[in-house]
Image: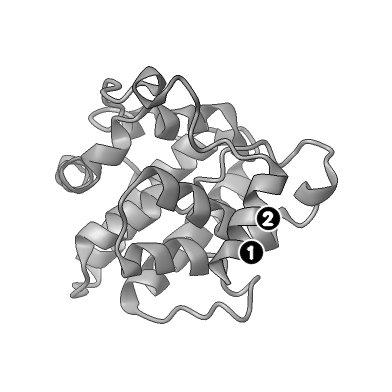
Amino acid sequence: MKIGEDKRIKAVIRKLGRDILVTESFQSEVNYIQHGEIDCYEHSLAVTYMSVWLASKLRLRVDLRSVVRGALLHDYFLYDWHDDVDWHRLHGYHHARTSLITACRDFPMNRTEKQIIFRHMFPLNISRFPNCKEVALVCIADKICATIETVHRKRYDPVIYKGLKLPIEVPMSERGGRWPSILRRDEICLMQAQEK
């Protein structure tokens, strides 16, 4: 199996995640490196593809819409964690919460989608055990893709973009010209305090 070659899986992703795929803020993930040469955008597409592929191969009865949307947004933190900034040092432990906060601000999401984003870093975040099949599925897909990206340290075949890189329909100018998901650390801390 080559990630991105099955047109049926990509059609499912397009149908269920279109409102995310067409936004400028989601596509801005190309500006942030995830593993090796892989940017967050490419990683998010790969994890989403792998999640749908696993659900199909294992014949799992899951909420596929939540799987697609949660997988697309699981690393929606929108900052370069490689920058030498104090709060980036524990990125692996904190980025799931940051991704959840930014995703909630930019997209309507159900509880399962929020749980996928918040719990996808298990077992690194040991207290965030997957609490449903959808969370476990994306968590496993994320670990598979992260391992591939770390070991091979090269980009995916460009076929992954075909049919998933859609034209931007929601430019930032329609949101007051501001990137709504790029948060300063103090904004994140304030939002986290308000959650409690």
Q: Which residue is mark 2?
A: 189
| Amino acid type for the residue under numbered disc 1 | Ala
Seen at 64% across and 46% down, the residue is 187
Depicted 159 relative to depicted 143: above or below: above
Q: Which residue is mark 1?
A: 193
Q: Which mark is residue 108?
A: none
3 on left or right of 179: left
104 on left or right of 7: right
Helix, strand or loop at label 1? It is: helix
Seen at 31% across and 57% down, the residue is 109
From the top left corner, tell me how far across and down residue 48 is, in percent: 35, 51
Seen at 58% across and 72% down, the residue is 196
Q: Is residue 47 visible?
A: no
Distance (Cα) linking label 2 and label 1: 6 Å
**Residue 20 sits in which quadrant?**
top left
Q: Is residue 143 visible?
A: yes
Depicted 19 relative to depicted 1: above or below: above
Nearer to me, 33 or 80: 80
